Image (cartoon, helix red, strand yellow):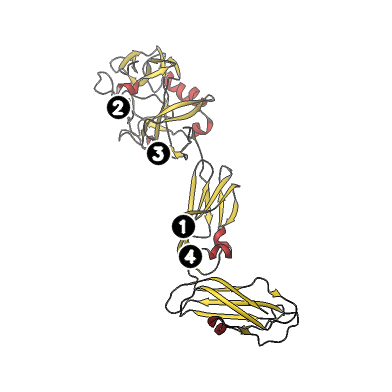
Amino acid sequence: MANVKLGTKAVGSIVKIKVNGASKDFIVVQQGLPSSAYDASCNGVWVVMKDIYTTMKWDGSNNDYLNSDMTAYLNGTFISLIDADIRNAIKQVKIPYTNYSNNNVMSGSNGLSCKVFLLSGTEVGFSGVSYMNTEGAKLSYFDSASKRVAYNGSSAAIWWLRSPYTSSSNYVWNVNTDGSDYDIWYNSSYGVRPAFILPSTLVVSDDGTVSVNTAPTVSTDGAALGRKNASFAWKYTVRDADGDTLTVTEKLDGKSAKTRTGVASGTALTFEQTASAAGFQKILNGNHTITVEVSDGKETVSTSATFTKAVHAASVTLAEPLAVEGDITVAVLQVTGSIPDDAKFKAEVTNNALDSSPVWQDATTEVKKGVNIVFENKTDTSGAAFNFRVSVERGESGEGGYIEAVSGAFQ
């Protein structure tokens, strides 16, 4: 499996975040804004700790959530325990809450500015409860009482909400052990399930761990490379802001052509198959897409370019002439393959290939007829040496072809 973005995780998924050095399970309870009652800052991935993290008093004086001991704890002591990278990524949000002075709900841009918070009664699915304000909207996850049940160790336990009991300043709403609503004196000690909102762009690994990562980047020579009739160098540079080593995969028309591992950030590379004559020859005429995929082990990015191979001519010769003792007076040459009748075909041979200016003799007619070639040249200054060169170019019909082999002999 591959790492995925946090924003793609289904509601109800478990993700892992370190708190005080230990990995803790969090439930994805909402993707995106729950409703228009929320400020745009709340647009992200809502997570709440799966189990009760600690037990404590909600406050020592009243049920004013804005100024409560609970709010101070969550945004002070607790948030400092979260792994630094994730702590820095937690969104500063404005959540709906009840104003202690008049019991009015403050929402939207007037919501409570915080990073970590308790869920409201409305958010966990309570509605129509006397003396409980509507603070926001139900989060997607909480569609039944069983989804509200939380555990402290092996036993279901009561846990705090941020919603005050509006007929008295002495009580706060809780979730009971069976998932029902329950109001309790603010000075009681019950379970805390911290919630916060993360950017959807964070990465989740196969084991559920959430991490902050900067995706690698690729800079290239361009995307539209035009017509190519010879090998060419498409250059690109891979970078990773986190300094991760990279795996680079080159693809031609969707098929892997080369993979490089352990590539350092800032490395300049060339797409190998198009850069060598041997590699380019294997590519058929027509439209092609070259793609580079770069992975830092957490995320993979890709970039592509297109080109049209339009090779309408080819030539073949020996890389090294064949030298012999004595003279070379006669040769025979065969060219096999598929060569259209209207193609421009030419065959030449030389018997003094080592000289500074070899004498090339047109042998096109003899090659086509399959007869012996009698050399006209009788001199050589560097010794007798044989070579040939065969060239073919597409004719007016536009029909393509190929040279499969060149064979022959000389004496």
Type of amino acid under label 4: Leu
Which mark, by number, is residue 284?
Answer: 4
Q: Quadrant of residue 127?
A: top left
Q: Contact, CB < 8 Å: mark 4 with mark 1?
A: no
Looking at marks 1 and 3 on the same chain, the residue that comes earlier in the sequence is marked by 3
- Say above or below: 169 vs 332: above
Quick check: marks 2 and 4 in contact, CB under 8 Å?
Answer: no
Task: Tell me the SS state at disc 4.
Answer: loop
Q: Secondary structure at mark 1?
A: loop
Left or right relative to 123: residue 207: right
Mark 2 lies on residue: 143
Residue 130 lies, in percent from the top left, at 24, 18
Q: Which residue is mark 3?
A: 8
Residue 180 - label: none
Task: State which tag comes first along the sequence, 4 or 1.
Answer: 1
Q: Residues under labels 1 and 2: Cα distance?
A: 47 Å
Q: Measured along the vertical axis of the image, is residue 324 above or below residue 210?
A: below
Q: Nearer the viewer, residue 165 or 176?
A: 176
Q: Earlier in the sequence, mark 1 or mark 2?
A: 2
Question: What amino acid is at disc 2?
Answer: Asp
Crowd rating for badge 3 (residues with CA inside 10 Å; few <14, some 14–19, many 20+): few
How far apart are the alpha carbons under marks 4 and 1?
11 Å
Residue 170 visible in the shown view = no
Q: Which residue is more in the foreground, 64 or 335?
A: 335
Which numbered tag is attached to residue 253?
1
Mark-to-mark CA distance, 2 and 3: 20 Å
As helix, strand or loop, the secondary structure at mark 2 comes to: loop
